[in-house]
Amino acid sequence: MTALELSKKYKTLLEKNGINTMLRLAHFFAQLDHESGLVVKRENMNYSAERLLQVFPKYFNAATAQQYARKPEAIANRVYANRMGNGNEASGDGWKYRGGGFLQHTGKNEYKTLKERTGIDYVAQPELLLNEADALIAALDYWNRSSLSLLADKDDLDGISDVINIGRKTAKYGDSNGFADRAAKLKLYKTVFK
C-alpha cells in the first residue's frame, strides 16, 4: 500500500494523533517508508557470518559468527540480550521483542511502553505489530511521545531521523543510518502531500 493510500485509509487516526499537515504527513511517511518500506514486518535477523561481523561486530568474532550464521532466533537473542528490558540470551526476549511494525519497535521496554500507552498488550502478543492498524497505532504513539511533530513543523529531517534511528537528537548532521534514503523519501512525500 502506498503512503497516500494509507493516509486516506487511516485519515481519522492520523488526524486524531496530530499528523494533519503536509509537513507532518511527509515526514511521518518518509520515516515509515525508510524503516519498513511501508510493509508491516518483524525484523528478519537472518545474517551470514560475514554480515554478522559487519552489522554486529560488538557481539561476534570470526568463530562465533560461524556458529550463529543463518540462525535468526539465536542471533536476535544474542544481540538484544540484557538490554532494552530484555532478559539474557536464554530468555528468548531478543527474538520475541525484535523489531516490529512500521517503525521496527525493538526491546521489551518498548513493547511495555506501547502496552501502557495504548492499552493493547504488545508484551504478551508482540506479533500484533504484524497487523497494519496495530503497526500504525504503535508508530503514532512513538511519534507523539517523542514530540516528532514539533520537529516536522521545523522541517528537521536530521532531528527526526536521529530520534528514530539513534534514540536521541545528536549534534552531527546526517549521522542516522540511511540518512540519504530518508532525505530522498522526504523529498518525494513533500510532493505527494502538497
Image: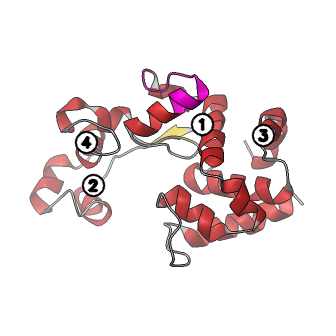
Q: Mark 4: which amino acid?
A: Lys
Please identify, in this view, whether the residue under mark 4 or under mark 3 is nearer the observer. 3
Callout 3 touching callout 1 (CB < 8 Å): no
Residue at position x 54%, y 59% in the image: 163
Q: CA distance from mark 3 to mark 1?
A: 12 Å
Q: Earlier in the sequence, mark 3 or mark 1?
A: 3
Please, is residue 45 above or below residue 96 in the view?
below
Residue at position x 77%, y 62% in the image: 153
Q: CA distance from mark 4 to mark 2?
A: 9 Å
Question: Tag 1's secondary structure?
Answer: helix
Q: Residues within 10 Å of mark 2 (few under 14, many from 20)?
A: some
Q: Residue furthest bottom?
A: 172
Q: Residues within 10 Å of mark 3 (few under 14, many from 20)?
A: some
The residue identified by callout 2 is: 48
Callout 4 touching callout 2 (CB < 8 Å): no
Q: Residues within 10 Å of mark 1 (few under 14, many from 20)?
A: many
The residue identified by callout 3 is: 14
The disc at residue 138 is 1
Query: Image quadrant for the C terminus?
Result: bottom right
Say which of 17 and 76 sits in front. Answer: 17
Say which of 31 and 146 sits in front. Answer: 146
Q: Mark 2: which amino acid?
A: Ser
Q: Is residue 47 left or right of residue 21?
A: left
The residue identified by callout 4 is: 71
Image-quadrant location for residue 188: bottom right
Q: Earlier in the sequence, mark 4 or mark 3?
A: 3
